[in-house]
């Protein structure tokens, strides 16, 4: 299941069926499977990444998030790839060796009558704490960059979408702290499709790995810029109340421990719990306002994940790119084998 | 006189067109909008279907 040519076919198919504008986004972890590539596989994998880049170029995505996996062959290779194509890679928190931002933090796009701002956030690599140099690049913590990135687009866009390769707990925290974000599309290691789930004012969603599905949301975006909670509003309120009780209990337990006031200020778990407590209180206050919902029409959506079955037709343009990429990989492998054989053969004239 | 009236009559469709163009250029903030979002993530270097 999966494949770029079937994805392209499906996108064109949907566009021909609907009479609404279509926005295409990719949250990243596009080029490589891991944040690093073993040296023996580097050549084949970079050829493959080039092929993917060419195919994505032909599919006209409005924005692509940059995950640590996309930088697996180093920032230099990534830079060369960007020169070869004009893919709209985004990252608000990626810095190069010189401390410069190599990518745009956000992009504005018009979809029908709606101006949509898309921001990219690169998740931190496993084993590399935030802010530490990783070869030729540095990933800044989201707390440092996101307020400024949002300030830049707020007021100019009617909808703000975040493409994030941070893990889900972080994205939930982001959604809780920044109600200006309306949708978060995650990339990472989550293995299955994740239907849009409301956290704060944002829906969080993700498609299963390895290009097996295409996510689709049919959105009716209303001027209130808030999602309708539908039938589950009482359930969400109860869940938020239960979470608040649990969080408050944990806070009180830490406060009862013998320690001075500075100790609490430096206690990271305590500070995170206090933030979560504030977020939950704000969420409960919002959920307890039924009158407001009646006054303003809220935005709605339907969502599904389209399986890219092998029985689907392939897009001929992308199929050509895939075939050419495979041939390049085979040729590179043959060349490598020839070099190894040449090296292992005895020098001419050498006889025992 | 007749000629002038005919000219005005001829100009009407042009005026309507101009008016429609001006109206379409006025920003329509705060409007509801329907659109389709197609999205993906974690392609993980795959170019072909898994297992093929």
Image (tube, rainbow, N blue to C red):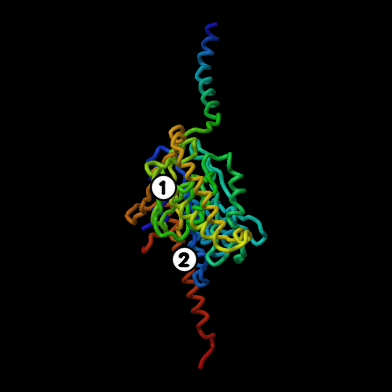
Residue A18 vs A328, above or below: the answer is above
Residue A199 at x, y percent in the picture: 47, 48
Residue A85 visible, this angle? no
Quarter in which the C terminus of chain B is drawn: bottom left
Q: Which label is found at residue B42?
A: none
Q: Residue furthest bottom?
A: A352
Residue A205 visible, this angle? yes
Residue A91 at x, y percent in the picture: 57, 54
Which SS class for mark 1? helix
Q: Nearer the viewer, residue A163 or A285?
A: A285
Viewed as shown, does residue A94 lie left or right of A20?
right
Looking at the image, is mark 1 or mark 2 earlier in the sequence? 1
Residue A32 vs A15, above or below: the answer is below
Residue A136 at x, y percent in the picture: 62, 64
Quarter in which the N terminus of chain B is drawn: top right
Which SS class for mark 2? helix
Mark 1 Cα shell of 10 Å, populated few (<14), some (14-19), many (≥20): few
Residues marked 1 and 2, same chain? yes
Q: Residue furthest top?
A: B1
Q: In percent of the image, x 40 and y 37: which residue is there? A: A19
- Label 1 – label 2 distance at C-alpha: 55 Å
Q: Which residue is mark 1?
A: A238
Q: Chain of mark 2?
A: A
Callout 1 touching callout 2 (CB < 8 Å): no
Q: Residue furthest left?
A: A311
Q: Which residue is mark 2?
A: A329
């Amino acid at each position: 299941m999966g494949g770029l040519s079937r994805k392209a076919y499906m996108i064109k198919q949907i566009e021909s069926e609907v009479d609404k504008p279509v926005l295409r986004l990719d949250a990243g972890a596009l080029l490589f499977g891991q944040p690093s590539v073993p040296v023996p596989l580097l050549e084949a994998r970079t050829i493959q990444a080039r092929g993917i880049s060419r195919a994505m170029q032909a599919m006209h995505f409005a924005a692509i998030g940059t995950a640590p996996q996309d930088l697996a062959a180093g920032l230099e290779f990534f830079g060369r790839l960007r020169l070869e194509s004009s893919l709209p890679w985004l990252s608000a928190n990626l810095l190069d060796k010189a401390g410069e931002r190599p990518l745009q933090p956000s992009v504005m796009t018009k979809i029908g009558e709606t101006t949509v701002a898309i921001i990219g956030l690169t998740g931190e690599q496993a084993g590399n704490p935030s802010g530490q140099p990783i070869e030729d690049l540095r990933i800044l913590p989201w707390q440092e960059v996101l307020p400024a990135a949002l300030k830049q687009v707020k007021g100019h866009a009617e909808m703000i979408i975040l493409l994030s390769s941070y893990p889900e707990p972080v994205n939930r925290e982001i959604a809780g702290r920044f109600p200006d974000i309306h949708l978060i599309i995650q990339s990472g290691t989550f293995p299955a499709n994740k239907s849009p789930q409301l956290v704060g004012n944002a829906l969080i969603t993700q498609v299963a790995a390895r290009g097996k599905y295409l996510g689709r949301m049919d959105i009716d975006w209303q001027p209130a810029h808030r999602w309708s909670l539908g039938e589950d509003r009482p359930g969400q309120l109860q869940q938020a109340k239960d979470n608040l009780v649990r969080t408050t209990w944990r806070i009180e337990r830490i406060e009862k421990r013998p320690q001075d006031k500075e100790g609490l200020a430096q206690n990271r778990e305590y500070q995170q719990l206090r933030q979560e407590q504030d977020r939950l209180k704000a969420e409960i206050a919002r959920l307890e306002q039924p009158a407001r919902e009646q006054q303003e029409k809220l935005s709605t959506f339907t969502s599904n994940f389209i399986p890219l079955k092998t029985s689907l037709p392939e897009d001929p343009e992308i199929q050509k790119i895939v075939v050419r990429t495979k041939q390049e990989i085979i040729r590179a492998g043959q060349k490598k084998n020839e070099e190894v054989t040449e090296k292992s053969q005895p020098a001419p004239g050498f006889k025992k | 006189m007749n000629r002038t009236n005919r000219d005005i009559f001829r100009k009407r469709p042009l005026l309507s067109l101009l008016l429609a163009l001006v109206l379409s250029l006025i920003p329509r903030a705060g409007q509801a909008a329907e659109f389709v979002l197609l999205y993906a993530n974690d392609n993980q270097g795959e170019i072909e279907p898994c297992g093929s």
